Image: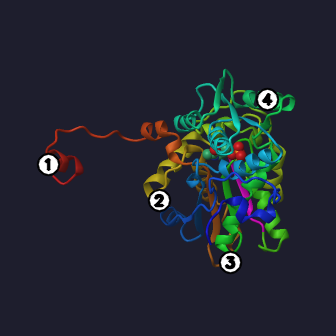
Amino acid sequence: MKWEGVIKHYRNYLPVTEKTPIVTLLEGNTPLISANNISKEFKGKIKLYLKYEGLNPTASFKDRGMTVAVSCALGRGAKAVMCASTGNTSASAAAYAAAGELKCIVLIPKGAIALGKLSQALLHGAKVIAIEGNFDDALELAKGITSKYPITLVNSLNPDRIEGQKTAAFEICDILETSPNYQAMPVGNAGNITAYWKGYSEYKEKGKIKNLPKILGFQASGSAPIVEGHPIKNPQTIATAIRIGNPARWKEAVEAAENSNGLIEKISDEEILTAYKMLAKREGIFVEPASAISIAGIIKLYKRGYFDSRSSNSHSPIKIVCILTGHGLKDPDIAIKESSQPVVIPPKEEAVLEVAGYK
Ligand SMILES: *Cc1c(COP(=O)(O)O)cnc(C)c1O
């Protein structure tokens, strides 16, 4: 079947009518890749799948929510949208606003967003405003302004964002023809964990799946308000997409973890970077650091024996889906910093062979 974007594909599950003008860049339908090499680490106990959301049009899952948020805003007569962003929301909002011919204003924490994301928001023509503060400050401003002016807030507080993002859960079930046993994902502002849980729950209600997956959410250690149980004033982590000290959907994230018998855990930057390099070197998949936390989390839980008791009554491996939320090209600085640099040599065959290890 021809792919026409998440709204047309999952229309019956989404808050759209025949009159809603659909703004789409044909987002969704991202691959669910078997992590055959990393799965070897788990000695047949786990079958790991990677939902590569970095292959959406603006290279993050935010596009799923943005197609619905921007379409519905347009349907209600909006002329402008605004968001606070650690980067990917601004890139996505800017692109969909451009496609829908809406004005777009984005508030970003000064100096704290990855290069690729900034380049997108700028080139798509958004008004990009850097705040001398962090994401949480930017979100407070965006909430205040959009409550007073005719501008639609397209952060994940906007329920249309959640509706669009839940379609990723549908896709996973449609491809697996069942639900996974576990799903691992990064947690920042906690919109996406809310969305996946809603998606799985609706699919179960409709009889499309029999069981709900356990939801495993991961926060970076320096930015783990939900794990610590209180807002973090000055969150720190190299995973800028989840550098959030006071998640807007905190309560829903806790509910998703608790109601599914999952958990929310914290993972160090070092563990994130190890998983980041592992995905690139062993699976050929380039993600941004925040996305790698899903893998880092599974490795940590596996080592702790978390999955031991959970597969004893079955011979088949447990199915775990890791959500890879954003593409690695978003943050090229980190990739280069974490790698050894190219060797510089004279243009001679001898020299190449020597460096390549053939001499
Ligand atoms: C936005 C984002 C997250 C966090 O998602 P939330 O819905 O804020 O929890 C994680 N990874 C990437 C790449 C993102 O862009």
Q: Is residue 350 left or right of residue 114?
A: left
Dot 3 falls on a residue whose secondary structure is: loop
Q: Position of residue 72 (x, y in %)?
A: 79, 49
Disc 2 marks a residue whose amino acid type is: Glu
State the separation of the CA atoms marked 1 and 4: 59 Å
Please report whichever mark, 2 or 4, sits nearer to the chain's N-terminal start.
4
Question: Which residue is drawn at the image coordinates 53% and 64% (left, top)?
Answer: 35
Label 1 vs label 4, nearer the camera: 4
Disc 4 marks a residue whose amino acid type is: Glu
For label 3, the residue is 314
Label 2 vs label 4, nearer the camera: 4
For label 4, the residue is 140
Disc 3 marks a residue whose amino acid type is: Ser
Please report whichever mark, 4 or 3, sits nearer to the chain's N-terminal start.
4
Q: Which mark is residue 283?
A: 2
Please tell me in which quarter of the rendered image ligand 1 is found: top right
Location of residue 243 by image quarter: top right
For the stretch drawn in magenta, what is the main secondary structure? strand
Label 1 vs label 2, nearer the camera: 1
Is 87 rendered above or below residue 26? above
Please report whichever mark, 1 or 3, sits nearer to the chain's N-terminal start.
3
Q: Position of residue 147 (x, y in %)?
A: 86, 32
Tell me which segment is drawn in magenta.
212-219
